[in-house]
Amino acid sequence: MRSFESIVALIKEHDIEMIDLKTIDLRGRLHHVTLPVKQFTANLLTTGVGFDGSSYGYSKVEHSDMIQIPDIESVVVDPFRDIPTLSFFTKIHLTDSARTRYHQDPRWVAEQAENYLRQTRVADSSHWGPEYEFYIFSNVEYDTRTSASYYRVSHDEEFHHNAYHACNPNDIYADFRDSAVRMMLKLGIDVKYHHHEVGERGQQEIENMFTTLLKTADQAILTKYILFNLAAENGLAVTFMPKPMFQQAGSGWHVHQYLTREGKNVFYGGGRYANMNQTGLYYIGGLLKHASALSAICNASTNSYKRLVPGFEAPTAITFGQANRSSAVRIPSYVSDPEKTRLEYRPPDATANPYLALSAMLMAGIDGIENQIDPTAEGFGPFDTNVFDKADQQIHFLPRNLDRALDDLEADYEFLLKGEVFSESLIRQWIEVKRGELREIATMPNPFEYKLYFDL
């Protein structure tokens, strides 16, 4: 646990001149405010800095004035500021006399999810290992106006074969990934490996090691911050859009996960299918039972559903299997350490707010354990071959668009309310914000519509 005094020591060690407070809005976009270092006092850790919460997409309470207080556990030296700067994620509080934590603060939701897990006594810790897929382009232009709408992507890579694990000199961004990973390691983000992904026009992957839920979500935001800034410094463009290019591989945010109690893996069942015991299967059952509702949070953009198209490698089937990439849940077969027995939830992408997405996954899994939702009895598998070959069995699939996913969330969110992890007002606000995006997109002509209909 860090103390005020330890932060003061960091300030002296790095000759810090500025303090940067970074706060996440509802959609997951990063905002910041910077203070001269003399403003960093013990009082700041209780009084915080005021801001307009309505500008961050949060629903108004009595009024939109809110407080952001630095979380000193999240401190890093910002690698992209010319003047030495300490950076903190924040906790959002109300302006009442008690400085109550704001229930729509995504970091608060993540904290509550971890607390609820401990309350259930199912486990005392959850562990998360995300895979970040993204594209690097040499240049990107886009604009939307009343009389114009377009995008143009330029890419220096153009493989004419599967680019998975492509090697230099063809893998032209290996040095970029090296630089990004070196920076991630310096900021405390433990990386497993990085490589070129299957996409032939510049798709990359960086996979992180396991850590706790809140820290994983913090690191997701910090990873994006590093990659976006590093790309800008190198005259490149990075995107986590699930489907930035037509007829190219989509980018996901696959999340490996498992639970432990007193350091022991709660899912491990030696000798059983994929070494997964009944508790682990119930957790999978919860994920799959609520998969359609989870889509509204884990696949939070209209672009998400251009990736989640049945018939491709995209994980659209509400099924599970060992080493099966066509299923929503895959149990990796290459895990040699019993204590790392885990599942991989494959549908999410990085347009999600990571705090809400990870918390929602955990709550679905807990619900499966508490209600003993057996995925085999529910018809979710296991399937160890391509589920699209199972014409004789009824396979259910994830929603085909964001509108349907939001409908499914409206019909199935009670599991998120347990332990006051999510509030009903947060879910309503999320749905309202996302339906607003749908209305905007639905009324804007698409360039492809001109190709199809202009001279009809």
Image: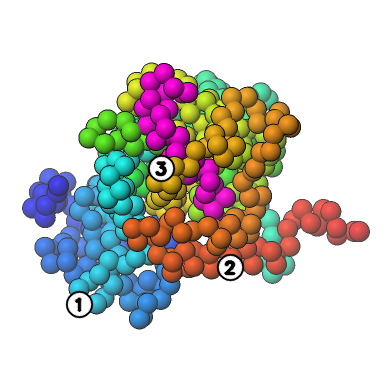
Q: Nearer the viewer, mark 1 or mark 2?
A: 1
Tell me, yes or no, if residue 44 can be seen here.
yes
Alpha carbon of mark 2 to alpha carbon of mark 3: how far? Answer: 35 Å
Mark closer to the chain start, 1 or 2: 1
Q: Which mark is residue 97?
A: 1
Q: Is residue 207 above or below residue 17?
A: above
Residue designated by label 2: 436
Task: State the residue lying farthest toward the right.
Answer: 456
Quadrant for residue 226, please give it.
top left
Residue pictured at 39% horizontal, 46% vertical: 370
Tell me, yes or no, if residue 299 can be seen here.
no
Q: Amino acid at mark 1?
A: Ser
Numbered disc 3: secondary structure: helix
Out of 222 and 341, give the one closest to the viewer.
Answer: 341
Residue pictured at 22% horizontal, 71% vertical: 99
Alpha carbon of mark 1 to alpha carbon of mark 3: how far? Answer: 39 Å
Question: Where's residue 392, x and y in %?
Answer: 73, 31
Q: Assign the magenta stretch its main secondary structure.
A: helix
Q: Nearer the viewer, mark 2 or mark 3?
A: 3
Out of 412 and 227, give the one closest to the viewer.
Answer: 412
Give the number of callouts.
3
Task: State the residue lying farthest toward the bottom.
Answer: 62
Question: Where's residue 164, x and y in %?
Answer: 56, 25
Residue designated by label 3: 369
Q: Amino acid at mark 3?
A: Ile
Numbered disc 2: secondary structure: helix
Residue pictured at 69% horizontal, 34% vertical: 393
Crowd around label 1: few <14 · some 14–19 · many ≥20 (10 Å): few
Question: Which quadrant would the C terminus be assigned to in this image?
Answer: bottom right
Alpha carbon of mark 1 to alpha carbon of mark 2: how far? Answer: 34 Å
Question: Where's residue 35, x and y in %?
Answer: 23, 63
